[in-house]
Image: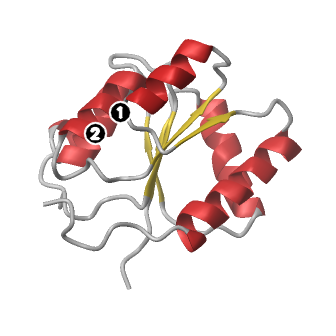
Amino acid sequence: MDEKIILLVEDNPDDVELTIRAFRKNNIGNKVVVAKDGVEALDYLFGTGVHAGRNVKELPVVILLDLKLPKIDGLEVLKSIRQNELTRLLPVVILTSSAEEKDKTNGYKLGCNSYVRKPVSFDQFAEAIKHLGLYWLIWNEPPPAGSNS
């Protein structure tokens, strides 16, 4: 059985740690690959830069994408994901602290599957991660293998 990898695209080390703690607290033991900026996220997905040579057919089951990222922002990352045949069907959940209507609207226009605002308290955050994990890792049925090509 293929390992269900989660790609977490987040530049804030505290939010990375909170997300990983929330996964552990809810017994979500999937491998979490962390990209600290938009360039690193795209390098991981497309096997370039620091991830050159990575098997790009081993894609994450879900991408948790922050919007406010250095180098390339989250909306540009999402646009690149949707424009590439290999990644265009990947589930992308925008996980952000932004409450801006334009961010939400643009995220959906560019093809995000879900938009989740980060709760302030750890308990609320852990609960949100639990539900995200249950849905995207257990209940959601991804497109059949090879349907991206």
Q: Please report contact status of discs 2 and 1: CB closer than 8 Å, yes or no.
A: yes
Nearer to the camera, 107 or 25? 107
Q: Residue at x 47, y 32 (%)?
A: 108
Location of residue 81 (image quadrant) = top left
- Drawn side of residue 57 relative to residue 1, left or right: left
- Drawn side of residue 134 relative to residue 6, left or right: right
Nearer to the camera, 114 or 120? 114
- Drawn side of residue 29 relative to residue 59, left or right: right
Q: Secondary structure at mark 2?
A: helix
Nearer to the camera, 83 or 74? 83
Question: What is the C-alpha distance between the residues marked 2 and 1?
Answer: 5 Å
Residue 82 screen position, x and y as percent = 27, 39
Q: Amino acid at mark 1?
A: Leu
Q: Residue at x 63, y 19 (%)?
A: 98
Which residue is under mark 1? 78
Which residue is under mark 2? 81
Q: Residue at x 68, y 18 (%)?
A: 99
Q: Quadrant of the N terminus?
A: bottom left
Residue 115 screen position, x and y as percent = 58, 36
Label 2 Cα crowd, 10 Å radius (few <14 / some 14-19 / many 20+): many
Q: Residue at x 31, y 53 (%)?
A: 89
Residue 62 screen position, x and y as percent = 45, 55
Say how the picture is coloured.
secondary structure
Residue 73 screen position, x and y as percent = 39, 19
Q: Amino acid at mark 2?
A: Ile
Q: Secondary structure at mark 1?
A: helix
